[in-house]
Image (tube, grey):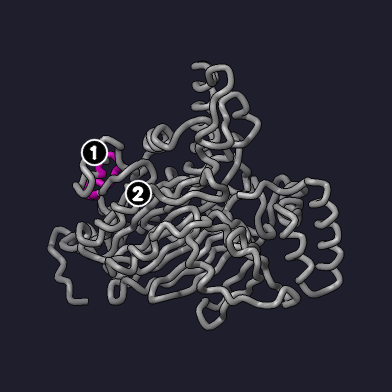
Amino acid sequence: MGDRVSEHTQRLLDAVEEERPISVSAKLGRLQFHRSGKFRVLQLTDIQDGPKVSADTVRLIGNACDAARPDVVVFTGDQIAGYDSAYAKTSRRRRWDVPRNGGPDKDDLDHTRDLVRRTIRQFVQPLVDRDVPFAVTFGNHDFQCGLDNAELNDIYREFPGCLNPPMAAAEQPGGAVSAAYSGLADQEAYACEPGTFALPVTDMDGRRNVIGLVLVDSGDYAKSGGYGSPSQRALDFLDAMPTVIGAKSIVFQHIPIPQFYDVLKPVSSSTAYAIQGYRSFDAACYILDESKTLPGSYLGEGVSCPDVDCGEFQIMKDTDGYFGLFAGHDHRNGFVGTTEGIMLGATPTCGFGSYGPVPDKRAARLFEFDIRHPYEPRTQLLEFGQIVGKPTTRKAYTFAMSHVPTNPGDAWNLLRKPGALATLAAGFAAAVASLGFTGKRR
């Protein structure tokens, strides 16, 4: 591999090999490639649950860590179902909503903080127990509990292994801060704003950065309708990071970008398995373009990207500093494609507290990087049915959230699935949708 390893690092690597921890990087004190030349990331997205997190979600997280042995876990938003009734006294649908009666009082906010801590503790406990570090960005539902992303960031940082930098570091964008607070004594982080920061991953001896992990707060809602986009500050940060890190990076965020439609193929609405596009793309139906997507990919709903292209993909191209972007948000999508030399990936929900694919298909996504070709990671879904088995809790609810449409367009999508059972399901779904009873959409 061409990298000489110091005697000190070699001793650490030998000790790691003997003990075989879940996260090699946690043992070594920084995110770095192993002696084998490998580095692993586990993406978890859209847990989207209330204060009592589904036991099946927790089982999936723990089993995925055991199966993947990741160096780091990345949460890509909507961990908190901010609309849950438990947060009724502090919740808000949109950031710009005017609080009623002067807003929630201190006791109500303190109660919400306690509930959020309880929620986070449940789904990060499998990582804490295994000494696996983690990083977190936010989605469009987290803030709805009544706490802004800066406060949520501070709460996550209370838990061992959290790599999110303190927001005081964001006042010096482009300047590295030590992530020793996370337990990784030699790790650096670059901060921008809550949910937007970068983590370099070094070679085996820590001499050079091989890749960067860039987390981006992709926004929540647009005042004009539909979903939001990263802030201008986040876009400027993306533009600067390739020079700062000195290596190409992979982006993790919640909301997909419009270019995800470039790996799909427009088809007739009568085509089997065709999926209607979302908002700006709803005039057409789509299937995966097999010439651009990996085998095993699937499309279960329209890609719900912002109506307006904010230029994020263009920055990734112009800087030549990025090789991929992976998002969550669309709970029923699990695909990876390539357009203009950049990997774009959708990861399905790992949670059992909201809508999604059938229980067997709820999943975590594993990335394995090889130092010989670090910009071409292998990726696969670790699905519940493969690594856990059958769900044990809330079976009726999970079944409903796997089959009830989130909007009337989803009912039409069901009609395009061939087979009598699908037709019956679509009929039921259309009837339910017509009554206005739908699963919570993102």
| Horizontal side of residue 364 vs 177, given as left or right | right
Q: Position of residue 35 (x, y in %)?
A: 26, 67
> Does the rendering let one see residue 162?
yes
Whether residue 181 is in magenta: the answer is yes
Q: Position of residue 16 (x, y in %)?
A: 29, 58
| Horizontal side of residue 383 vs 420, given as left or right | left
| Location of the N terminus (image quadrant) | bottom left
| Horizontal side of residue 368 vs 221, given as left or right | left
Residue 171: assigned label = 1
For this rendering, which residue is in front, 322 or 211?
Answer: 322
The residue range painted magenta reads 179-188
Q: Residue at x 67, y 66 (%)?
A: 276
As displayed, is residue 33 above or below residue 356? below
Q: Secondary structure at mark 1?
A: helix
Which residue is denoted by mark 2 in the rendering?
A: 232
For this rendering, which residue is in front, 223 or 209?
Answer: 223
